[in-house]
Image (tube, grey):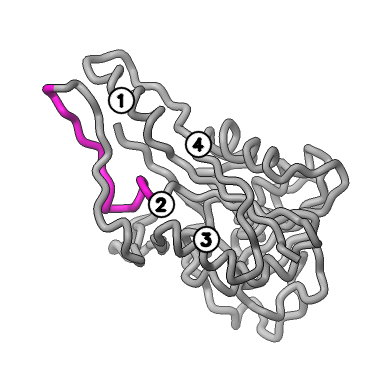
Amino acid sequence: MKIKIIPRRNTRKPIKNSRTSSQRKQTLWDQASRWYDSLVGMSGSDYHQTIVMPGVLKLLELKAGRRVLDLACGQGVFSRFLLEKKIKPEGLDSSEELLRMARSHSVKPITYHLGNAGDGKLLDGQEFDGIACLLAVQNMEKVEPVFQNVARWLKPKGKFVMVLTHPCFRIPRQTHWGWDDEKKIEYRRVDRYANEMKIPILTPPFIDKVNFTMTYHRPLQNYFSALLKAGLCVDSLEEWMSNKESAPGKRSRGENRARKEVPLFLAIRAMRIS
């Protein structure tokens, strides 16, 4: 059983930026934007629709009309979802191309900001009732300045929810499914969990094998330490399983059981301490 998860990244119309679009350095996600947009679409992948977006909305615990920052919003799938729930979303992303797609996909106007989520001057003076980051924190090279900004942007008692592919079990190239034919069980092999790693991921179109995005593996203690240092206290953690089912066959029972035992996603909620 192999499940391919495509995570996501770092974004009101840009606050004044001294560099024009032609001068702005293209990000890896600008290069992968068309592929990612075709993958996610207007409403999100099956995982977005059935697991991730409803789960994040539940953890945010927000009433209608509250203001939420969709951090690393990409082409705006979660922002559109929030708008349907009568939440007031704003998106932030570092990819100009993905934000262009987000604006074109949004039937009702949503404010999207262009910028790096770790920029200490970004969204200065802005405050949000909640902040969400879906399948993107693992694509950020440095999480410490991002979490510091999250604490700065959150209102007192505001909630920050981030979802990532589970760092204990879903490390690209370091975790694999295996099959024990004697016991008729599927198991998950995990290597190099405790080490931080920078891992390139090839993305279409595979032109001379140079199109790629980056993922950054970190053990759980690194995330918790960075959150606490930023003044954010974790008050909830949930592990979400895959909702897929194997086609009937000699391994289907073991595969389906393994899916219910090895989490696919990790959701962490943190609150501003003061």
Residue on which disc 3 sits: 224
| Secondary element type, mark 2 | loop
Where does the image place residue 193, in percent across and percent down from the top left?
A: 31, 56
Comes first in the chain, label 3 or label 2: 2
Q: Report the amino acid beneath label 3.
A: Phe
| Secondary element type, mark 1 | helix
Residue drawn 61% across the image and 54% down it: 234
In this rendering, position of residue 273 left or right of residue 41? right
Residue drawn 38% across the image and 42% down it: 4
Task: Give neighbour class at mark 2: few <14, some 14-19, many 20+ (Cα, 10 Å).
Answer: many
**Of tags 3 and 4, which is closer to the observer?**
3
Q: CA distance from mark 3 to mark 1?
A: 31 Å
| Secondary element type, mark 3 | helix
Residue on which disc 4 sits: 240
| Secondary element type, mark 4 | strand
Q: Report the amino acid beneath label 2.
A: Pro
The stretch in magenta equals 167-182
Where does the image place residue 37, in percent across and percent down from the top left?
A: 55, 49
In this rendering, position of residue 224 left or right of residue 269? left
Q: Nearer the viewer, residue 173 or 75?
A: 173
Q: Report the amino acid beneath label 4.
A: Trp
Q: Which mark is residue 255?
A: 1
On the question of residue 123 being in view, the answer is yes
Residue 130 vertical position relative to residue 195 in the rendered view, above or below: above
Q: Nearer the viewer, residue 265 or 36?
A: 265
**Of tags 3 and 1, which is closer to the observer?**
3
